Image (cartoon, grey):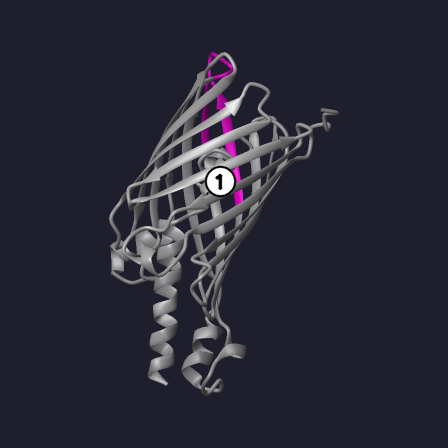
């Protein structure tokens, strides 16, 4: 029975590492709410985002991630809801988040301070249906009988017409418990610590260029640096994205805005060494729907 427990723990470690080290590439430009609760409702109107990510598809039991998020803004208040599902091997991780944000304009209406808070509930489950062994073992039953794991994230930001600064601190209860008791709520090996980013938009004659520098902290892993650039046509219909990650991988993306209301997004992330010889890269697709915008005839 011990080998099954070891396998479960190993899958949890791999799942957490892959989810935190290789997050959705859409968070850099298409859906900032994924990385920072303060950005929920930072733009006027309401939007729904869908995303699917298939990592190392050539490897059996490879990670698969999907999410759906909704965000809206009413006056200065932003609201958000997200459901994130991660699966690797026989372990499934479901996470539900509710978000409250406030957006405070300064003297210039284009300059705003953003503050946000996530409250999350997480459930880890081992899929006994695919188990080759004793599914009635009490150790596995206790693993699945664990209740919801509650936690929270805090985010803040500052934005002007061209510049945006962001900071987010994740899993606040987990970090506080570890500092005070050296214990853990979720018993996972790695989790996000923080996200720090600065982006700047450079207008051009026929294109717009947005650059973004991000610094990410992951528990039990080297902090990561991401350098991202997005070129978008003047009518905003077409965008090309390139991202370099300090774990020696890179992401390339393409997005298309249809009728000014539906944005289709696709990414490919190259596999970092040393697993590049045995696994292919990561594919990601997404869809953003702007609910309060009338579709364009073009």
Q: Is residue 184 magenta?
A: no
User: Residue 67: x percent and y percent?
Assistant: 55, 50
* Image quadrant in which you'd find residue 129: bottom right
Q: Which residues are magenta?
A: 98-115
Q: Residue visible at 28% across and 42% down?
A: 246
254 is higher (above) or lower (below) than 6? above
Magenta part, dominant SS:
strand
Q: Position of residue 99 (x, y in %)?
A: 52, 42
Residue 39 to residue 298: above or below: below
Q: Secondary structure at mark 1?
A: helix
Spot occupied by residue 202 in the image (x, y as percentages of width and height)? 43, 17
Residue 105: percent from left, percent from top: 49, 20
Q: Is residue 53 left or right of residue 289?
A: left
Left or right side of 59 for 46: right
Residue occupying image coordinates x 28% and y 53%: 273
Q: In this rendered view, identify the residue nearer to me: 193 or 119.
A: 193
Q: Residues within 10 Å of mark 1 (few under 14, many from 20)?
A: many
Q: Which residue is mark 1?
A: 26
User: What residue do we see at 69% from left, 30% from top?
Assistant: 292
């Amino acid at each position: 029975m011990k080998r099954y427990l070891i396998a479960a723990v190993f899958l949890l470690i791999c799942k957490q590492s892959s989810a935190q080290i290789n997050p959705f590439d859409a968070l850099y430009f298409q859906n900032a709410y994924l990385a920072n609760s303060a950005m929920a409702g930072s733009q006027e109107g309401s939007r729904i985002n869908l995303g699917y990510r298939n990592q190392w598809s050539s490897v059996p039991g490879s990670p698969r991630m999907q999410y759906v998020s909704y965000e809206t803004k009413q006056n200065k208040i932003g609201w958000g809801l997200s459901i994130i599902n991660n699966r690797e091997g026989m372990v499934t991780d479901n996470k539900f988040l509710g978000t409250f944000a406030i957006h405070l304009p300064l003297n210039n209406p284009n300059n705003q301070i953003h503050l946000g808070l996530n409250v999350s509930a997480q459930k880890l489950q081992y899929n006994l249906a695919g188990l080759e062994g004793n599914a009635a073992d009490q150790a596995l039953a206790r693993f699945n009988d664990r209740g919801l794991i509650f936690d929270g994230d805090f985010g803040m930001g500052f934005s002007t017409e061209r510049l945006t600064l962001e900071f987010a601190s994740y899993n606040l209860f987990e970090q506080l418990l570890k500092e005070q008791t050296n214990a853990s709520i979720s018993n996972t090996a790695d989790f996000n610590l923080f996200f720090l980013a600065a982006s700047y938009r450079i207008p051009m004659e026929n294109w717009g260029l947005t650059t973004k520098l991000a610094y990410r902290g992951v528990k039990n892993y080297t902090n990561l640096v991401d350098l991202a650039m997005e070129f978008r046509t003047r009518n905003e219909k077409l965008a090309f994205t390139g991202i370099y990650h300090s774990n020696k991988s890179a992401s390339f993306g393409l997005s298309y805005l249809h009728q000014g209301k539906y944005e289709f997004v696709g990414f490919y992330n190259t596999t970092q060494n040393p697993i590049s010889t045995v696994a292919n890269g990561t594919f990601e697709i997404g869809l953003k729907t702007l609910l309060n915008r009338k579709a364009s005839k073009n």
